[in-house]
Image (cartoon, grey):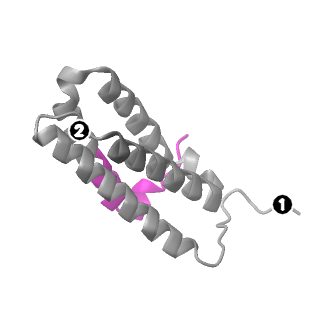
Amino acid sequence: MPAPASAYRDFPGRRWLGVLLRAAHLAGVVGVGAGLLAGEAAAAGFVYLMVLSGVAMALLDAWSRRRWLRELAGLSLLVKFALLGWFAADEARRPLLFWLILVFSVIFAHAPASFRHRRLR
């Protein structure tokens, strides 16, 4: 019998994998931000690190909690992807978009679980 949509799936080491992915993601964000603050293009390595680790964290969250994509936390990720697309396409607004994405991400990452996991209707 399949598990209910609200079931949480886990595996040994999932927590540490999440911690390592988050550390890699933050290193990528810092690298991209440092490039922007220095007035240079972000090094491709930092961009790849930021994006790939972010996608990996999202996939891990979606796998662990299938209904996550129907919650505000999942919706916030779609908004962040749209903002990242704008960031990639609009060089003139990259510094502003970097800070907007950073603040948006921190608010959703640290909001109470009762808010982040609120289901969309």
At x 26%, y 44%, the residue is: 32
Evaluate if marks 2 and 1 touch, with contact meaning CB atoms under 8 Å apart. no
36 over 54 or under it: above or below: above
Query: Which quadrant of the figure contains the N terminus?
Result: bottom right
SS assignment at label 2: helix
Compared across the picture, whether 27 is left or right of 37 comes to: right
For the question of whether residue 111 can be seen, the reply is no
Residue 106 lies in quadrant? bottom left
Place of residue 107 in the rendered image (x, y in percent of width and height, measured from the top left): 28, 53
The question of residue 116 being in magenta is answered with: yes
State how far apart marks 2 and 1 are (Cα): 41 Å
How many numbered marks are there? 2
Residue designated by label 2: 98
102 up-or-down from 82: above or below: below
Residue, disc 1: 2
Query: Magenta span has 44?
Result: no
Residue plotted at (64% across, 67% down): 8
Which amino acid is tagged 2? Phe
Stretch in magenta: 104-121
- Dot 1 falls on a residue whose secondary structure is loop
Magenta span main SS: helix
The quadrant of the picture occupied by the C terminus is top right
